[in-house]
Image (spheres, rainbow, N blue to C red):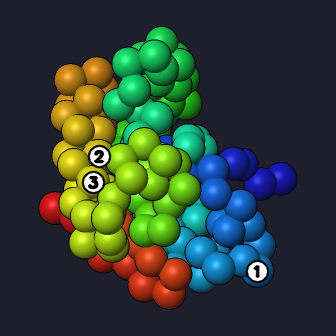
Amino acid sequence: MSKHYSDAMVIRCADDRYSANREFEAAFLSILKKEEALDHFQAYGFGAGLEVINNDNLRLWLDRIRLAKSLGIKRIILVQHLDCGAIKDVYKPADEKAEREHNLDIIYSTRNFFAQNAPGFAFTAYLQNLDKFEVIN
Ligand SMILES: [Zn+2]
């Protein structure tokens, strides 16, 4: 009998292009392999971290942190992506460079949120495009 185990909560956008055989799947799986987190708990949000830093969702994310602790999760992996409908809707970036900057701001704000509300959790962030990704430090 196998035992399900994961030490990671992965936060990514709810974009349907993450579904099997869709545009974002391959790069996302590469991130999970790099993190050795193929077995993980996933939390979707429109714009990924964009939902984490929205004050209206504070209680939801505090609940998720509590649940993650109870499940023994010790790290959070945030995956932002370019060409994000949620980010375009909120920020209306003029071009991909501007959209990238908004993603970086979201990543840093999300990192701060978890540093304050989930101390002791490791935090790693990625920015992915259709076929590639980069680690954001
Ligand atoms: Zn998105």
Q: Which of marks 2 and 1 is nearer the N terminus?
A: 1
Q: Residue at x 60, y 82 (%)?
A: 26
Q: Nearer the viewer, residue 48 or 94?
A: 94
| Left or right of residue 47: residue 105 | left
Cβ–Cβ under 8 Å for marks 3 and 1:
no
Please state the horizontal and vertical placement of residue 19, each as a whole percent of the image.
Answer: 74, 67
Question: Crowding near pointer 1: few (<14 within 10 Å), some, many (20+)?
Answer: few
Q: Which of 30 and 121 is in front in this view?
A: 30
Is residue 22 visible in this depiction of the protein? Answer: yes
The residue that disc 3 covers is: 102
Question: Crowding near pointer 3: few (<14 within 10 Å), some, many (20+)?
Answer: many
Is residue 77 visible in this depiction of the protein? Answer: no
Q: Which of marks 3 and 1 is nearer the N terminus?
A: 1
Name the secondary structure under disc 1: loop
The residue that disc 1 covers is: 21
Give the answer, above or below, for where 78 lies relative to 68.
below
Name the secondary structure under disc 2: helix
